[in-house]
Image (tube, coloured by chain):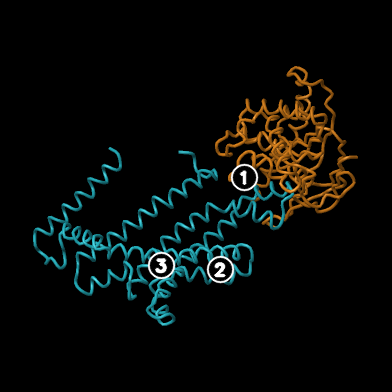
Chain colours: A cyan, B orange
Amino acid sequence: MPAVIKRVIFFASLILIWHGIFLLGIWPESMIPSPFTVAETLYAGFADMTLVYDIIASFRHLLIGLAISLVIGTLLGVLLAKVKTADETLGTMILALQSVPSIVWVPLAIIWFGFTEASIIFVVIIGGTFVMTMNMRIGIKNVAPIYLKAARTMGSTGMDLFLKVVVPASIPHAVTGVRLAWAFSWRALMAGEMLSTGPGLGYTLSYASDFNNMSLVIGIIIIIGVIGSIVDQLVFQRIENRVLKRWGMEEAA
Amino acid sequence: MYLDIDNTSKSFQRKDEQRLQALENINLSIEEGEFVSLLGPSGCGKSTLLSTIAGLSQPSSGSVSLENELITEPGPDKSMVFQEPALFPWMSVKENVTFPLRKNLSKKKQEQAAADYLKMVHLSQFSENYPHELSGGMQQRVAIARALAMDSGLLLMDEPFGALDEQTRQVLQDEVEKIWLDTKKTIVFVTHSIREAIKLSDRVIIMSARPGTIISDFKVNLERPRQQQGMAALEEDVMAILKTEIENVMEEELQYAGSH
């Protein structure tokens, strides 16, 4: 059976079980709404464009933050890979920072930037930067020595060697870094938006919770999950697979 | 002489505090246009010697010079083919071949050179392909074309066919022999295959391990292309020299293993 059909059956049964639990009426509708109510809420949200504006706002925060984090992460990664002292000092700190959950940065951002979009973008940048840094660092450090030897016998040295060989050779790790940075930023974005004053998916989620609108809460959780996995699978995994194949790190499918 | 290796030694510091004498007092002179093989068991320092000639590693003492110029760093005056093709996977076949030419030749001349050398290794149709789309033997041909495109007088080959199957290996041996006859480059060829060394070279240098020294240096005066029957007697001689050598190495290994 093709995976697609298995998935359809799985999700259909999940919705049926959910609806069954709703019909049993053990919990009030304000806690367990019917899947059809959630669908209606989502439909209404898209019909009056409120959810569309939220998604656009969220993507704006994400893209600005992610772009900045990729630039900073790439530069920091190159620095750590090339300068041993930086790796031994700053590298340790970045490793520690990487283990700090992004939501921790929200209170700090609010004090620095207030309830503004800058706060959200700041949290998104923090979310993506460190994982990009570490991947870029590994990518540059792990360039196969044979490439460097071969390039040197062909008269490539210094900046030419770095730009024409080291950087392209580290692309597979960089691509993984971008994919992980996206995933981390997406999580950080929701944390940042939930404590913001809108617009954005995270804001609407916490707003819905404040007004006990359970069907909207569930609806937005679904949107967040769907967007997250669609972007990951349709965009990043495809790019990653293509790069790995081209770089000869994976057998051609 | 064209290439002079003068009293060259190389030692490495090992983790267990012992120093490994990879090369000891190597003296070797190679004439321009000569096809020389460095033959020996693994660990005899033949690859180390080649990498010293390439300028990729520096001797601990002694010197290596090419046309009376001391070799201190790698460069396009001595092209190298490694055991792995070492092609850049993000570049097409053509871009790989023109990589060493970027700075010195016009776009048009680069294209021409790539076309010429890819034709020489019978890969003209594949110039737009990427390395991962080619077989191991084809990739190694591209590596040879890339080394030839540099048009250096000296071509260094470090077990270039070591990772290939027997048939591909024979085809490529014939191609390299033909290229050498056509271009008259000086080739220093590292191999552990006796037959390969005898088939291709004017002169075979046999090396021994621990410390890496030259134990035999002889000319191969057989007519090209060389036939199996003509090579057999010579092969046996070399085998006899290497047999004691290999036994010594094995014994040493056992002693080493016993004492640890």
* A92 lies above or below B12: below
Image-quadrant location for residue A21: bottom left
Q: Which numbered disc, 2 or 1, marks the residue closer to the eye?
A: 1
- The residue that disc 3 covers is A61
Amino acid identity at mark 2: Gly
Could you tell me how many numbered marks the image carries?
3
Q: Which numbered disc, 3 or 1, marks the residue closer to the eye?
A: 3
Q: Nearer the viewer, residue A70 or A184?
A: A70
- The residue that disc 2 covers is A91
Q: Residues within 10 Å of mark 2 (few under 14, many from 20)?
A: many
What element does badge 2 sit on? Answer: helix
Which residue occupies the extreme front position in the image?
A: A48
CA gap, disc 2 and disc 1: 29 Å
Mark 1 belongs to which subunit? Answer: B
Sequence-wise, the earlier of marks 3 and 2 is: 3
Amino acid identity at mark 3: His
Q: Quadrant of the N terminus of chain A?
A: top left
Say whether mark 2 and mark 3 are on the same chain.
yes
Amino acid identity at mark 1: Phe
Residue drawn at x 31%, y 71% as measured from the top left: A203
